[in-house]
Image (spheres, rainbow, N blue to C red):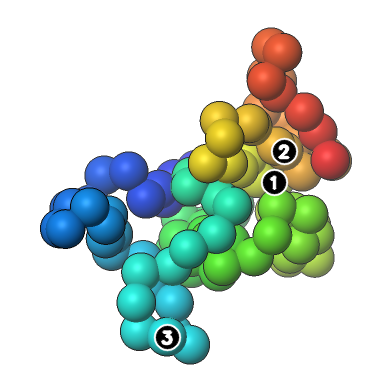
Amino acid sequence: MVTSGLYERCFERAGITYWHILDPRTGYPVRGDVVGATILSERSLDGDGLTKPLFMLPVPDALAYLEYHGVQGLLVTGGGDIRTTGASDFGLVGSRTRNE
């Protein structure tokens, strides 16, 4: 299990929050719907590599990306919603939890 998020390694300057996950298209910190991602994979190295692109994708595309790569995932959005892949074993319960 691997988790990546925009909430740990960050700093604020002039009212703008910067974090360690960069968008290779711009060179600046990524801006998107996903603020946290957890992946269940055979090897943690694979999970770590698969989490980073999720921050650059819309939530439905990020979930499809995980399914394509055959791993289970959990995404947290900036609005606090939790989304999981269709075949998730995370077993989450709550009003803010939805499977796509």
- Which residue type carries mark 3? Thr
Instruction: Give the image quarter of residue 7.
Output: top left
- Which residue type carries mark 1? Gln
Disc 1, SS? strand
Q: How many marks?
A: 3
Disc 3, SS? loop
- Report whether residue 30 is seen: yes
* Residue 51 pos. (x, y %): 52, 59
Q: Which of label 1 and label 2 is nearer to you?
A: 2
Instruction: Give the image quarter of residue 87.
Output: top right
Q: Which residue is mark 3?
A: 26
- Which residue type carries mark 2? Thr
Q: Are marks 1 and 2 in contact (CB under 8 Å)?
A: yes
The residue sitting at 70% across, 23% down in the picture is 97
Q: Which residue is mark 1?
A: 72
Instruction: Give the image quarter of residue 21.
Output: bottom left
The residue sitting at 44% across, 77% down in the picture is 23
